[in-house]
Image: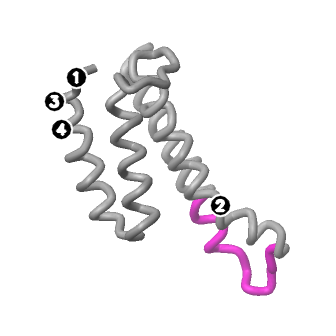
C-alpha cells in the first residue's frame, strides 16, 4: 500500500469517526431519541472498555489462560475489586498497575 493510499485511508476513517460522533450534537432540538435508545447508549462506554480490556486479561500470550500464572488477570481482578469498593478511577488504575508490577516481579508461578 502506498503512502498516499495509507494517508487517505487514515483521513477517511478520521472523517467518518468525526461525522458519527458529531451527528448526535447536530440533530435539531425537535428530534427526540426514543427512550430505549437512550437507555441502551448508557451501556456503550462499559461495553467498549470491556471489549478493549478483556482480551488483554484473558489472552496474555494469544491463548486463553485461566491460571494463577496469568498476572494480568490477577491484577485485573484486584483493579475490579478496588473499582467496586472505591469508585475512584485514579486509585483503580494506580493499584491495578502496582499489582501487575508486583505480580510480574515476584510471582512464584
**In which quadrant of the rendered image does the C terminus lie?**
top left
Q: Nearer the viewer, mark 4 or mark 2?
A: 4
Residue 102's mark? 4
Residue furthest to the bottom in view is 30
Mark 2–mark 3 contact, CB under 8 Å? no
What is the C-alpha distance between the residues marked 4 and 2?
A: 32 Å
Distance Cα–Cα, label 1 vs label 2: 38 Å
98 up-or-down from 39: above or below: above
Residue 53, horizontal then vertical, whole percent: 46, 40
Q: Which residues are magenta?
A: 21-33
Q: Residue at x 54, y 46 (%)?
A: 50
Q: Decide: marks 3, 4 in contact (CB < 8 A)?
A: yes
Earlier along the polypeptide chain: callout 2 or callout 3?
2
* Structural distance between the alpha carbons of marks 1 and 3: 6 Å
Instruction: Identify the residue under disc 2.
Output: 43
Residue 5 is at least partly visible in this image:
no
The residue carrying mark 1 is 108
Q: Quadrant of residue 46?
A: bottom right
Q: Which residue is mark 3?
A: 106
Residue ID at (43%, 32%):
56
Where residue 101 appears, as percent x and y from the top left, is: 19, 38
Amino acid at each position: 500500500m502506498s503512502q498516499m493510499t495509507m494517508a487517505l485511508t487514515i483521513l477517511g476513517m478520521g472523517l467518518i469517526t468525526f461525522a458519527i460522533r458529531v451527528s448526535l450534537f447536530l440533530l435539531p432540538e425537535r428530534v427526540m431519541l426514543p427512550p430505549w435508545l437512550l437507555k441502551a447508549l448508557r451501556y456503550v462506554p462499559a461495553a467498549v472498555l470491556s471489549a478493549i480490556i478483556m482480551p488483554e486479561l484473558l489472552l496474555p500470550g494469544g491463548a486463553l489462560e485461566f491460571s494463577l500464572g496469568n498476572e494480568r488477570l490477577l491484577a485485573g481482578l484486584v483493579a475490579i475489586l478496588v473499582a467496586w469498593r472505591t469508585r475512584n478511577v485514579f486509585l483503580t488504575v494506580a493499584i491495578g498497575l502496582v499489582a501487575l508490577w508486583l505480580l510480574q516481579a515476584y510471582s512464584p508461578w
